[in-house]
Image (cartoon, grey):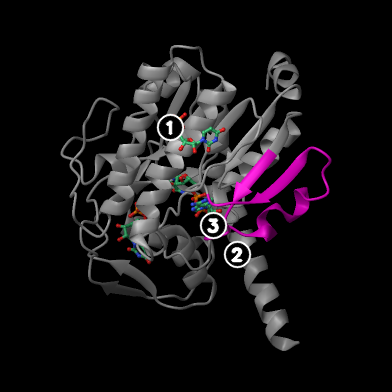
Amino acid sequence: MQQGEFKELARKRILVTGGAGFIGSHLCRRLLDRGAEVLCVDNFFTGSRDHVQEMQDHPRFELLRHDITFPLYVEVDEIYNLACPASPIHYQFDPVQTTKTCVHGSINMLGLAKRVKARILQASTSEVYGDPETHPQTEDYWGRVNPIGPRSCYDEGKRCAETLFTDYHRQHGVPIRIARIFNTFGPRMHPNDGRVVSNFILQALQDKPITIYGDGSQTRSFCYVDDMVDGLTALMHAPDDAHLPVNLGNPEERTILNLAEIIIEFVNSRSTIDFRPLPQDDPRRRRPDISQAREKLGWEPRVSMEDGLHKTVQYFEGLLRSRREEGAE
Ligand code: NAD
Ligand code: UDP
Ligand code: UDP
């Protein structure tokens, strides 16, 4: 961290929507550590008070229960718009609400940014590329997205949010940032949201069968959450002309079968592999081209898969332990 950056944040009041979620709670902690005042806004759909519990008594931290599909009138200097369920199980639970969060939520947060002249960052996603025909994905690729499939509420919602952000920039001069986030993992991932890293770790820790959808040859690239938070803050503080989308993720690509093998070995598990049907519209390959982030932000992931898994496994071990203790009470 630069000394100057610390001084700059020390004067800032920062709104994090979705701040009680997985990435949001790590971001709130980082911003507090850098001297900012943090207003965390969350409707607790997938987030939890537990994630921000350790910040509750901090004098510069404030938690507000609010749904961003409704207007919000507060005074802030910067906005990180992370509010949105991120895993297929959660965003497909109430697809209309998912689209509303992406579209109405973005309009409200952009209206707020416009009124208070705040810089605003949108947590977009690699899902805007859909099931891509080009590999790896660069920011100028327009994507291949099914507009009426089960993933559309999220993919198209996030695409529309990018459109809104860009038009508020062009039409109203709002200073925007768009981060296209690729698969991220780490402590405070939801144990029950069906994402691959959390599923595999929990299954391996309990010696249960590892559920691979399809033959496991599909690929993803996994970024540790601390690296992602670095990328988000670097993008927020990038020079004024950085309004175009930037990929943030780890370019190290692996197959889902390979991930299963690594995790089984890592936790020394007796789990076997259980092949299940591949869900509809499941992307075949995904790897970010992060040249833009390297050039514009001087950012790239630093945490190795092994170190990231170590911390994540520790977190889930703790979670299973407390579940057992609760069960025993
Ligand atoms: P998460 O589900 O843990 O966090 C999202 C948070 O937003 C939750 O706390 C939830 O309660 C809150 N929320 C949802 N709808 C809301 C609403 N209408 N009003 C207020 N709060 C609301 O997910 P995450 O993994 O931390 O993702 C954070 C952001 O990053 C999301 O926008 C997601 O789309 C994006 N993203 C995440 C990943 C990833 O791998 N985790 C990948 C790409 C993009
Ligand atoms: N908005 C908000 N907080 C503010 C300012 C605006 O939530 O501090 C909402 C407002 O309810 C509006 C939306 O943001 O629906 C878009 O605002 P904008 O000024 O762009 O549009 P308008 O108010 O003209 O519809
Ligand atoms: N996946 C899997 N087993 C699981 C959970 C997921 O094989 O228990 C697969 C899933 O089909 C996808 C990949 O792992 O191909 C990543 O899934 P996740 O939901 O974590 O992320 P996304 O598909 O949104 O990238």
* Mark 3 or mark 2, whichever is nearer to me: 3
Is the CB–ligand 1 distance for label 3 below 8 Å? yes
The residue under label 2 is: 316
**Looking at the picture, which amino acid does disc 1 mark?**
Ala
Query: Which portion, as a residue range, is magenta?
Result: 39-67
Marks 2 & 1, CB-CB < 8 Å contact: no
Mark 1 or mark 3, which has the lower sequence index?
A: 1
Visible in this render: residue 287? Answer: no
Q: Secondary structure at mark 2?
A: helix
* Along the viewing direction, whichever of 44 and 8 lies nearer the viewer: 44
The residue under label 1 is: 179
The residue under label 3 is: 189
**Looking at the picture, which amino acid does disc 3 mark?**
Met
Residue at 54% of width from left, 65% of height from top?
A: 267
Tell me where residue 211 appears, x and y as whole percent: 35, 71
Residue at 31% of width from left, 38% of height from top?
A: 160
Q: Quadrant of residue 6?
A: top right
State the mark number for residue 198. none
Q: Secondary structure at mark 1?
A: strand
* Along the viewing direction, whichever of 21 and 198 lies nearer the viewer: 21
Tell me where residue 249 appears, x and y as whole percent: 42, 37
Quarter holding the N terminus is top right
Q: Is residue 287 above or below residue 280?
A: above
Q: Is residue 146 left or right of residue 152?
A: left
Marks 1 & 3, CB-CB < 8 Å contact: no
